[in-house]
Amino acid sequence: MNKPNIIYIHSHDTGRYVQPYGHAIPTPNIQKLAEEGVLFRNAFCANPTCSPSRAALLTGQWAHSCGMGGLANRGWSLPVPEHLIPHTLNKVGYVTALAGFQHVVRNVKDTGYQRILAQENGNAGAEERACAFLDEKPNKPFFLDVGFGETHRRAKGFDPPPDGEPKTDPRYVKPPPTFPDNPVTRQDMAEYIDAARRLDWKMGKVFDALEKNGLAEDTLVICTTDHGLAFPRMKCHVTDHGIGVMLIARGPGGFDSGKVVDSLVSQIDLFPTICELAEIEPPEWLQGHSILPLVGSEVDDIRDAIFAEVNYHCCYEPQRAIRTKRWKYIRRYDNAKQWALPNCDDSISKSYMLENDWADQPVESERLYDVVFDSSEAHNLAGNPEYADVLAEMRERLEQWRKDTADPVDENQIMTPPDTAVLNDPSDVSPGDKRYPAVDIVG
């Protein structure tokens, strides 16, 4: 098989809140992609903060394994940029191009992309740059990275709907299940929906350009996001509300026919999938598994658990998690008595939660959830003696993963920020454990 073209098209802070995951959010272009491709219902990011999540996907490694502890706009930069997938694809004849933003290295040249389209057409949007690239009808296989700023918050709100379209009426909106249904949360969710509609409109431009230029049949489109919504108790949290992500793929290799896959997959599984599909020798550092056997119905599962972590966002809040089909176990590695509230982006929902004593909610060092009977992860079973055996097993599995991947974090050892990070006195930023530094700017 000829090497497929690949489009990695992605958003900020979208979780699974798009139409094909059953939400009343009109994203017709993403819906059409799902109906023509493969929808992964149980896909998870490796870290529910932006730069570490993207670094894990693009290197095929867990965030602590590739050394990405925090955000690129706060001084972090991937210490192993040569592990980014463009470097591997360049060696086997791909044209690699970046149409949108990247958020993993301080110097964009380190990404390995042969063409930085913003440097060629800086006044255009990511979708316009991508369409112009596709209009060239490249005669070599290509990897095109199209990253959008939607649905990241803009101050406390979101981007507006597509030009000329009316705003979503908040009276008929349902907030995420982590929140009460009231005028504040409905308004916040309505504004998110408008941003999701704009995201879908932009993605549709790219999908249309593929069709117009006769490239769709030979192009694998990978559509995903970095982590959950920028709402309280979602983004920056290792519950499913934070690490659950949309993942839709369409193109050669069996990614067609509107198939739905319920098996557990991690975004670190995408790099090895591309290697298998393009018949490339996988680099030795990869920690994921190809999802092609799932797509081809050769196996029911490629993994029996996914893992996730948090280190830095605005503040240091070290957490690790393991999630199986039945259980979720979360462990903190600090002595915090309160949530690191600056890690939650400002919003009207956050203000409402704080007015109702969110800051006083208890912080638990261990959490165990039965995700079959408690899918919202609201009832911690870690202290229930009836689940002592499950707790012990999940503890052991998480610690084994940490050992196998040389996780540097524990109660006495932190991931040290780079010298380029801007640090504040933690008392100015974080109500958590004062041993740990906090990093300013909420991104």
Image (cartoon, helix red, strand yellow):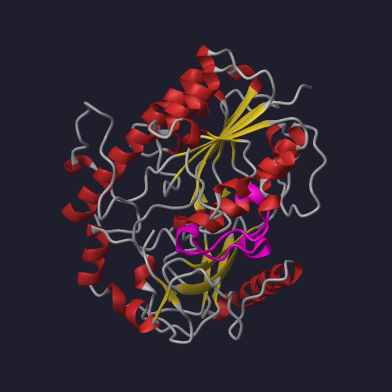
Q: Position of residue 348 (x, y in %)?
A: 22, 58
Q: Is residue 303 left or right of residue 380?
A: right
Q: Position of residue 26 (x, y in %)?
A: 34, 32
Residue at position x 35%, y 71% in the image: 341
Residue at point 40% right, 33% down?
A: 125
Q: Nearer the viewer, residue 227 or 5?
A: 5
Part of the protein shown in magenta? 57-80
Q: Is residue 28 left or right of residue 164?
A: right
Q: Nearer the viewer, residue 228 or 406?
A: 406
Residue 139 shows up from this direction: yes
Would residue 79 be counted in the magenta stretch?
A: yes
Residue 266 visible to the viewer: no
Q: Quadrant of residue 85?
A: top right
Q: Quadrant of the C terminus?
A: bottom left
Q: Which picture quadrant has residue 40?
A: top right
Residue 279, quarter of the rendered image: top right
